[in-house]
Image (tube, rainbow, N blue to C red):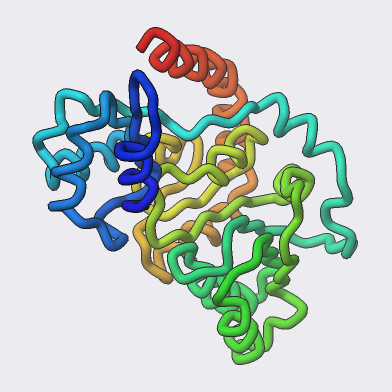
Amino acid sequence: MDFISYFVIHKIKAKKKIQWIHFDITKIGFDVNFATKLYKKFDKIFVVSNEAKNKLIELVPTIKKKSEVFLNLVSPKVIQDQSKEGKGFIDNFEGVRILTVGRLTTEKGQDLAIRVLARLVKEGYKVKWYCLGEGSSRSKYEKLINEYNLQDKFILLGSDPNPYPYMDQCDIYVQPSRYEGYCITTLEARSLKKPIVATNVNGANEQIRNEETGLIVNIDESELYEGVKKLIKNKKLCNIFTNNLDKERINSTIELEKLFEIVKNY
């Protein structure tokens, strides 16, 4: 990250230069002194969520006046179109399908999902949890899956260039991340109007109205378990979330237009 910023300032010729920060700076190796010296040379600093922006300004207050929020962007129409292409699930499972999409890494929290599923299975719920993505923690997660005897219940699907058929076909989407800037997979699941359980990371409250368009829980195994179980048991609540997201979908197009105007006019 620092190398890219340095390179743009010192090696790229341009009339205007913009920095875009799309992560939680408090969760990575963020060099405050470096950022203070370098970021003042950018014409504009965009941050991916309000919460992430506030954290940045708290550490680098000198850039407050040139900082604005610019959200991750997706096209709901493209997502909906692509959700009808590709194979999706092929196992003919008739229970509740839970999906998580993301790199298999500690920050994405799939280990929490494995432990939550073990508790759900122990209580007798007919459920499978699928994970799309690859990453450095695959072997660790495979051992954890074996430890809880979930080989046929917690399914590591690997990577797929088109995750949207899986999102469209799942019953519940869960984002168990330990940190995010503004989670794009949650945004994609919202575009498909899925009932969502998400951990309270940066941007979660900017995407989900808790108990209205989804559930937000603390980054905690027990709270994640209670949230997922709540949706498994309450189909009516799932339908409420879906209906409310359907109403929000129209507004997302308006927000995209506003964001494009920010950049174009700047």
Query: Looking at the picture, how far across and down is residue 262, in whole percent?
Result: 39, 14
Question: Front-most of 254 and 246?
Answer: 254
Extreme-top residue of the structure = 265
Question: Front-most of 218 and 106?
Answer: 106
Query: Looking at the picture, how far across and down is residue 141, in whole percent?
Result: 59, 80
Query: Looking at the picture, how far across and down is residue 14, in whole percent?
Result: 38, 24
Can residue 205 be seen in this snapshot?
no
The quarter of the displayed image where residue 76 is located: top right
Count of number-bearing discs? 0
The quarter of the displayed image where residue 187 is located: top right
Extreme-bottom residue of the structure = 147
Query: Looking at the picture, how far across and down is residue 171, in whole percent?
Result: 69, 50
> Is residue 91 positioned above or below 40 on the image?
below
| Residue in view at x 44 percent, y 18 percent | 259
> Is residue 45 positioned above or below 103 on the image?
above
> Is residue 143 positioned above or below 253 on the image?
below
| Residue in view at x 48 percent, y 16 percent | 260
The quarter of the displayed image where residue 211 is located: top left
Extreme-left residue of the structure = 62
Image side of residue 20 versus residue 68, left or right: right
> Is residue 142 positioned above or below 195 on the image?
below
Question: Front-most of 32 and 121?
Answer: 32
Image side of residue 155 versus residue 102, left or right: right
| Residue in view at x 76 percent, y 46 percent | 162
Can residue 145 be seen in this snapshot?
yes
Quarter of the image with the C terminus is top left
| Residue in view at x 89 percent, y 60 percent | 90
